Image (cartoon, rainbow, N blue to C red):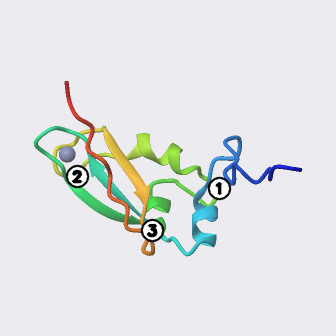
Amino acid sequence: MRFSQAMSPIDPVSLPDLAHYRSHGIDRITAWCLTPFCCHQAVLTFEELAAHGADEATKLLAVKPRLKCTKCGGLHADLQPDWSRRCTSPVARSSI
Ligand SMILES: [Zn+2]
């Protein structure tokens, strides 16, 4: 008897870059400001990210520190790929 080894489809070593998401049909991200009482949210296309120096080989996690809120100027933002077929919403963390 043998167990399947296909447990981890995501290799943590190779973080997804913009080209990876584009291959899945994703061409934009949703970003939102983490500043309390701001909650500004915006959709950024990869073209707009490219205007800020990101290219196809840029890791999505590397984009996050470059984001700046256009509403409050805060540098604390979070983002996620805009999965049109998946309907996931960010889970609000409970504050202590
Ligand atoms: Zn903000």
In terms of sequence position, does the residue under pointer 3 or pointer 1 come before the other?
1
How far, Cα to Cα, is label 3 from label 1? 19 Å
Q: Quadrant of the C terminus?
A: top left
Report whether the residue tagged 2 is closer than 8 Å to ligand 1: yes
Looking at this rendering, what residue extends furthest in the right direction?
1
Q: Is mark 1 within 8 Å of ligand 1?
A: no
In the drawing, does residue 11 fall left or right of residue 73?
Answer: right
The number of numbered discs placed on residues in the rendered structure image is 3
Q: Which residue is mark 2?
A: 70
The kind of residue tagged 3 is Trp
Q: Secondary structure at mark 3?
A: loop
In front: 21, or 64? Answer: 21
The residue tagged 3 is 83
Q: Report the image quarter containing ligand 1.
A: top left
- Determine whether 25 is above or below 12 in the image: below
Residue 38: x %, y % from top left = 14, 46
Nearer to me, 67 or 2: 2
Furthest-top residue in this view? 96
Image-quadrant location for residue 64: top left
Tell me which numbered mark, 2 or 1, is placed earlier along the sequence.
1
For residue 87, side relative to residue 58 (left or right): left
Q: Residue at x 42, y 66 (%)?
A: 82
Residue depicted at x 49% and y 71%:
27
Q: Which mark is residue 57?
A: 1
- Looking at the picture, how far across and down is residue 35, in whole percent? 20, 39
